[in-house]
Each structure stands twice: as structure tokens, then as C-alpha cells.
Amino acid sequence: MKKEDVFPELYVMTQDAVKDYRTDFDHDKRLIDEMPEGTPFIHIAREMGTHMYMLPPAMSEKYPKEGERVPYLFSSADRNHMLRMVKTCIEYHYFHHNNHTWTYFDGKKFTNITPEQAMRLANDYTLKVKSDWIDHE
């Protein structure tokens, strides 16, 4: 799927689930635009907005080098903290809001997923990135 087609398709699939904070879709589009074509992600659409978790490769520019800290949210973080937040946030939604619309983009196509599948994807992603970091040390 071409990069310019990703957000429009995501929007059509999920927009009915979002009643308020629809400007979250603007942030989703920006995140997609900032990532290289084919970057996988997990998207959660809920009545009060969306959440999107990009799943870039371990050696992408999203993650700082080992030992470096970069501005992150309201403070700073190293790459391990940033990676851990993907899984932590998915877990939060799984345990507290799992009735939302969950969508996975594998870099080529969209799939509606269950919260359980999202948890597995986040866990597998975390393990793969950590392994890749070790392999590149």
C-alpha cells in the first residue's frame, strides 16, 4: 500500500468509533507521514479519540543510540524506556478499555485485531527490537 493511502484507509475503517476528540486523527496522520513507508502500527479508536503506536525497526531514527537520552513526552528517555512504553500503553488499553476498535497495519495491509492480538504483537515487537539491538552492539 502506498504511504499516501494509509491514513485515508485507516480513517474510513475507524472514524465511526470516534465521537469526540476527532482531531486525534490529525495526529495520527502526522505520525504516519513522519514514518518511513511501510512502518507497522497498532491503532486504537475509541469514543473519546484515538491512540496510535508506531512499530519502527530497532535501528530506525525513532530510537536513540544506546546510552543516549532524548526529549520524550514531558521529560527525556532512553531507547529502552521508549520501547517499554509501547507495550505498557497497549497493556493499559487491554486491561482498562479493551472494547475499543483495534487495528493493525503490518506495513502493507490493515487487519482488525482483538486486544489479545495487540498484546501479542506488542510483546513480539518488543522482543524483536531488543534482540536486534543486541545483535548490533
Image (cartoon, grey):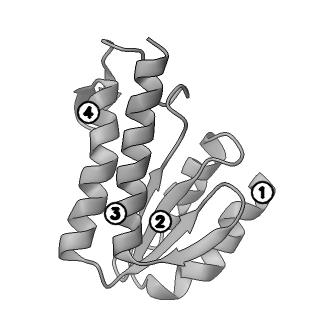
Q: Earlier in the sequence, mark 1 or mark 3?
A: 1
Mark 4 surroundings: few (<14), some (14-19) or many (≥20) residues within 10 A: few
Marks 1 and 4 in Cβ contact (< 8 Å): no
Q: Residues within 10 Å of mark 1 (few under 14, many from 20)?
A: few
The residue indicated by pointer 3 is 119
Disc 4 and disc 2: Cα gap in Å? 20 Å
Residue 29 drawn at (x, y percent): 60, 57
Q: Nearer the viewer, mark 4 or mark 3?
A: 3
Which badge, 4 or 3, is on the more N-terminal residue? 4
Relative to residue 23, is residue 70 depicted above or below?
A: above
Q: Which residue type does callout 2 highlight?
A: His
| Residue 96 x/y as whole percent | 18, 74
Q: Nearer the viewer, mark 1 or mark 4?
A: 4
Residue farthest along the right direction in this orientation:
2
Residue located beneath label 4 in the image: 81
Vertical position of residue 9 compared to residue 34: above or below: below
Amino acid found under the numbered disc labelled 3: Met
Q: Position of residue 5 (x, y in %)?
A: 77, 63
Q: Which residue is mark 2?
A: 43
* Disc with the residue nearer the chain's start (2 vs 3): 2
Q: Which one is in front in this view, the residue at disc 2 or the one at disc 1?
A: 2
**Residue at 54% over, 80% down:** 14
